[in-house]
């Protein structure tokens, strides 16, 4: 059983994430979408909301589970969950520069490998931060997020 972890804040999850995770699931028997919490970061959506949006997005796909990652080391989490690989999408060379030291550290910590998946061209400009900003300023983000995420953004706006 080859298991991989796709970690992230997913605040909120968007179509660039979905595309990379779907491709990861074709490479591994099981993919764990691990939703992180970092208390030095401020999130728009609570952990429960981020989990719910991610679970809703993958409800039709087999072999993908969504769970909280907690606050510890990603390498330890992968070790505890029996995952041999971390899968990360790469949008640019600066993503690679940022990710390479972490991949090396994670491998040295527990032996977990990192597999990089090149992002689909139509999504490589996306980030959760950009989607929130465009939405907040009245832009149409419907082509970039699943319907359940769009509803959540709209519900938060009118609350
Ligand atoms: O979506 P994000 O916020 O970019 O996700 C970042 C994440 C969860 C992948 C990163 O913060 C992380 O790896 N956190 C775990 C803490 C850890 O292991 N730090 C050492 C990295 S070498």
Image (tube, rainbow, N blue to C red):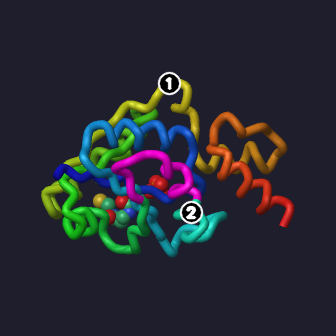
At x 38% / y 48%, what residue is drawn? 62
Q: Residue at x 39, y 68 (%)?
A: 69
In this view, 35 is above or below 98: below
**Residue at horizontal 49 percent and vertical 43 percent from the top:** 17
Which mark is in front, 1 or 2? 2
What x and y, as percent, mark residue 75?
25, 63
Q: Mark 1 near mark 2, Cβ–Cβ under 8 Å?
A: no
The boundaries of the magenta stretch are: 53-65
Residue 60 versus residue 66: which sits nearer the camera? 60
Q: Residue at x 25, y 44 (%)?
A: 28
Residue 32 place in picture, x, y as percent: 35, 56
Q: Considering the numbered disc 2 on the image, is that residue within a helix, a strand or a loop?
A: helix
Earlier along the polypeptide chain: callout 1 or callout 2? 2
In 3D space, how far apart are the residues under numbered discs 1 and 2 (Cα atoms)?
Answer: 27 Å
Question: Where residue 52 is drawn, which disc sits there?
Answer: 2
Q: Which mark is residue 121?
A: 1
Q: Residues within 10 Å of mark 2 (few under 14, many from 20)?
A: some
Q: Quarter of the image holding residue 23?
A: top left
Q: Nearer the viewer, residue 4 or 99?
A: 4
């Amino acid at each position: 059983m080859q298991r991989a972890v796709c970690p992230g804040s997913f605040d909120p999850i968007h179509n660039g994430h979905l595309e990379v995770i779907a491709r990861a699931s074709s490479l591994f028997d099981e993919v764990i979408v691990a939703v992180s919490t970092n208390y030095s970061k401020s999130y728009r959506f609570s952990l429960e909301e981020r989990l719910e949006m991610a679970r809703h997005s993958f409800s039709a796909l087999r072999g993908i589970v969504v769970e909280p990652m907690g606050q510890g080391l990603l390498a330890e989490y992968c070790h505890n969950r029996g995952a041999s690989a971390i899968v990360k999408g790469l949008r640019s060379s600066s993503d690679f520069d940022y990710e390479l030291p972490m991949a090396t550290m994670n491998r040295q910590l527990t032996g977990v490998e990192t597999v990089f998946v090149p992002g689909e061209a139509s999504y490589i400009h996306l980030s959760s931060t950009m989607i929130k900003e465009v939405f907040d300023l009245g832009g149409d983000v419907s082509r970039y997020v699943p319907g359940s995420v769009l509803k959540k953004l709209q519900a938060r706006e009118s609350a």
